[in-house]
Image: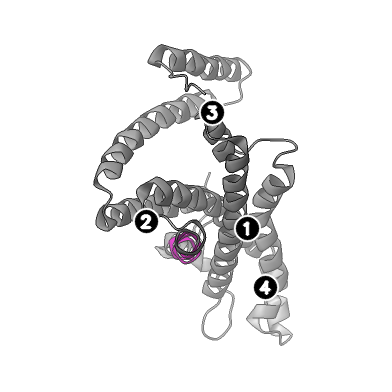
Amino acid sequence: MTLIDLSWWQLALAAGLVVALAGLAHVARLGMSGSLLVAGLRTAVQLSLIGVVLEALFSVATLGWVALMAAVMLAMAGREVVARQKRPLAGWWGAGIGTASMFVSSFAVTVLTLVVIVGPTPWYEPQYAIPMLGMMLGNTMTGVALGLDRLTDTVWRQRALIETRLMLGERWQEAVADARRDATRSGLIPIVNSMAAAGVVSLPGMMTGQILSGTPPGLAVKYQILIMFTITAGTGFGTLVAVSAASRRLFDGRERLRVDRLRPVKR
């Protein structure tokens, strides 16, 4: 099977579709034309740069450089978690909890998958480690961001109810239990939907990319199943850790609700 190369002018034609969509959004006064253009530009620039970085990384393939790349990816993911929330935790707590939860879940599941299941030599082979970690962080980031956003927004709106339950003698875990469950479910819904629709409604990105690059469909399917399962585990564990840690942060040592630990709503 011959791999068809893509030239820059062909990519420019695809970019024209995004520009056309931005034009229609402007005509319809959706207020998103600028965001679409900026997002499209960021996509092109960021992916072009990461292509250069990965080529250099693949040629070196040392643990130190792979770890540095992973740390940068984790830091950027932690920033995006806070950026997408309407009312995040104040101070460094929002980014700290999001980053720590993704580190615990995504890194643990990725290392386990590389060492126990896939088994490349060395285990940190960037051809396997970086793409797997990237997919893990991307999906875990979405789950954590949705879970934290739902938690903080619900606690803010239901603060009177939660304080009443505290006054009636409930522990903080009981007073905020409903909000925690709803937040965790919100974080898990996207990945559950992706698993349910895989192969029926959509062909996942990794599988599609492997097939386009000439990988036999049977092998591509095996890798996609592995990735879906590990992503689900990482997203679930990360969301649970983040929601639990953020819930505790919203109460002080005397189990009083502290909504002042939330930033003002973003406009």
Which kind of residue does numbered mark 4 sit on? Val
Q: Secondary structure at mark 1?
A: helix
Residue 76: give x, y in percent of width and height: 39, 49
Residue picked out by circle 3: 212
Instruction: Specify which label sits upstream in the sequence, 4 or 3.
Output: 4
Q: Locate residue 8: give its quadrant.
A: top left
Q: Is residue 74 magenta?
A: no
Q: Locate residue 183: give its quadrant.
A: bottom right
Residue picked out by circle 2: 121
Instruction: Specify which label sits upstream in the sequence, 3 or 1.
Output: 1
Q: Main secondary structure of the magenta part?
A: helix
Rendered position, 111 above or below 200: below
Range of residues picked out in magenta? 99-112
Residue plotted at (54% across, 16% down): 17
Tell me the tag on residue 153.
Answer: 1
Residue 164: give x, y in percent of width and height: 72, 77
Instruction: Specify which label sits upstream in the sequence, 4 or 2.
Output: 2
Which kind of residue does numbered mark 1 sit on? Asp
Residue plotted at (34% across, 57% down): 122
Rendered position, 144 above or below 55: below
